[in-house]
Amino acid sequence: MDQLELMKQMIEQLNTAADSYYSGRGELMSDYEWDALFDRLKALEEETGIVLEDSPTNRVSSETITGQKEAHEFAALSLAKTKKPEELVKWAEGRKIWISWKLDGLTLVATYDGGKLSRVVTRGDGHTGTNITHLAPAIQGIPRTIPEKGHTVIRGEAVISYADFEAFNMESEEEYANPRNLASGSLTLKDIEEVKKRKIHWIPFTLVYCEPQIVSWGERMDWLAKQGFEPVEREVIDTPDEAHVNAAIDAWTLKVTGGINPYPVDGLVITYDDTEYAATGSVTGHHATRAGYAFKWQDESAETELEYVEWSCAASTITPVAVFRPVELEGTTVKRASLCNISECERLGIGTKGTVLEVIKANKIIPKVIRVSRIEGQLEIPAVCPVCGAETQIYESPVSGTKTLRCINPDCTAKQLKKYTRFVSKAGMDIDGISEQTLARFINEGWIRSYGDVYRLREHREEIAQLDGFGEKSAQNLMDSLTKAEDVNDQKLMYALCIPLVGQDVAKRFLSAYSFEELIRIASETDDPGVFSQIDGIGPEKSASFVRWMKDEKNREILNDLFALVRVHETERTETGSACAGLTFVVTGDVHVYKNRNELKAYIESQGGKVTGSVSKSTSFLINNDITSTSGKNQKARQLNIPVISEDEFIERFGQN
């Protein structure tokens, strides 16, 4: 095969994989494989001097979001990339630079005129994007108004945190490969409420244009913060020599490997502080030579042998997990990696014990099987659920064509994972050391089938200590947490039970009128589902839901089982008043008179007031001891002419317990 034909073949592979990925149809190759093939193509292009029109090196992305197309006022060009720190040093030319995250999501350009959001457009091909302004209310971080009244253009990345991604995947009918894939698929939706569920955050990474003359990139980012935005995390490097650049890269890499950064990133970006100098660069293809330089980590890979495939059931999906001979990657021992779904197993060619795998930690964090070099045997897909033993079925998504394995039993314990997560949460039974992922593992081990089984984890102490990621100390810490959580107040217990329509506030209202014992007795004996509707804030629907739950024999068994394992303490009844009646408060920052913000919130509610998490037109007061702060909430309050008062001013006006 000659070089031209080889280039055409590479281009077809890369474009097909990118099109599938960005359209939400799933991965045809890993990021690692795509980057490696891209680098080979680029090297071949440089060697031959030929760049074909449809080459991915000659365009920005393969975005397939449909809608009204609009030309960008300022071209959204891509950055040159490197995996060599010394090339960053050379590019910096000794000038003051900034380092920030290369966020792994979708670039959106937001424009403001007269202080109001006028449009939001996707990056598209860098010159033309798709107008998705209608979705702006569903994306966190894009304010509707800003103090600046002039023309303003901001470029930022729409991302989904790892935590929000995992939570969404747990409950979703569709299984997404990674947060970027979910973000991409979300922006193709028309239903704003559905997009809101994805919890997309927009993080500005550069101020493209504003009317005030601000030359420094760092000052431009500070200006964005004063407008109410939350720009990308950044650090200045005044002397960008090899030592300082390497030290900065090492420090930022530790933030990734240490799990400090909540959002997916696929590298770092360095930018000149002098924006006028940055604008003097030339444009080569789709790259602006001085606009910035991207650094991508060199993934460390290792070859190992498959021991077995574990099938882990969570929510509606049974996920294959490769368990292999331990290898050292990025300074840690790795011995398991999710295989995502059946389609990924088929794509890779996963077999049985002895199959030779190549493994990386994608973006320094997530263990990932990227290649199979030798297959042994044939993977068997379980016919029954590993948790409940019910029949399984293979589901093929009509959207992406991805095949996943599912349990057909609607009462499978694994499908109640969210309930168990709420049960052990701080607002519930407050059991430290049990994350959602840990609960899923315990459920898959067969140790948890009811709420009471959480406390019976003591019987599995030695087995827990042997689990990957635990050890003796973690196991003992969990045992100590279970002992501590044997004492619980009635409000926390009621919330932990996951009774439909009974959240923290509703539980508080029920228990302000009756003791837990009285509530159980009344619900058990009554024929009137609305018996509790006379309680302030309850109403017929919530009353009926509580009565229905308490009358269910299985639920009563669950409750009685718990009562045998824990000691329930009645919440001290708070004297009520009307000092805050009809008013809505937002509390932010540190408090110094009250023990914490929750105590202040409790007082406001006891006085007939309401506390919300964000500032809006309905907010009466923002309580912040740093009245002069330029935080987003303070900025929003000033825009809406809402009084910002300190804790002392609040006490002076509304009293204190």
Image (cartoon, grey):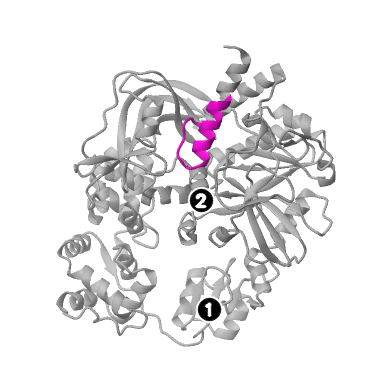
Residue displayed at 32% across by 18% down: 376
Up-down: is 388 above or below 90?
A: below
Q: Residues within 10 Å of mark 2 (few under 14, many from 20)?
A: some
Residue 241 visible, this angle: no
Query: Measured from the top left, where is residue 615 in percent x and y?
Result: 58, 71
Up-down: is 437 above or below 502?
A: above
Tag 1 residue: 584
Residue 614 numbered mark, or none: none
Main SS of the magenta part reads helix
Query: What range is drawn magenta here?
Result: 11-30
Query: Measured from the top left, where is residue 83 in percent x and y?
Result: 65, 28
Q: Residue furthest top?
A: 1
Circles 2 and 1: CB distance less than 8 Å?
A: no
Query: Measured from the top left, where is residue 546 in percent x and y?
Result: 26, 72
- Quadrant location of residue 42? top right
**Residue nearer the viewer, 68 or 227:** 68
Query: Which kind of residue does numbered mark 2 sit on?
Result: Thr
Q: Is residue 23 magenta?
A: yes
Residue 102 visible, this angle: yes
Per the image, label 2 sits on a secondary structure element best described as loop
Tag 2 residue: 188
Q: Is residue 458 magenta?
A: no
Q: Residue furthest bottom?
A: 578
Q: Residues within 10 Å of mark 1 (few under 14, many from 20)?
A: many
Question: Which of the two marks, 2 or 1, is nearer to us in this view?
Answer: 2
Side of 440 relative to 143 (left or right) = left
Up-down: is 97 above or below 304?
A: below
Side of 644 relative to 73 (left or right) = left
Query: Which kind of residue does numbered mark 1 sit on?
Result: Thr
Per the image, label 1 sits on a secondary structure element best described as strand
Q: Label 2 to label 1, Cα distance in Å?
A: 36 Å
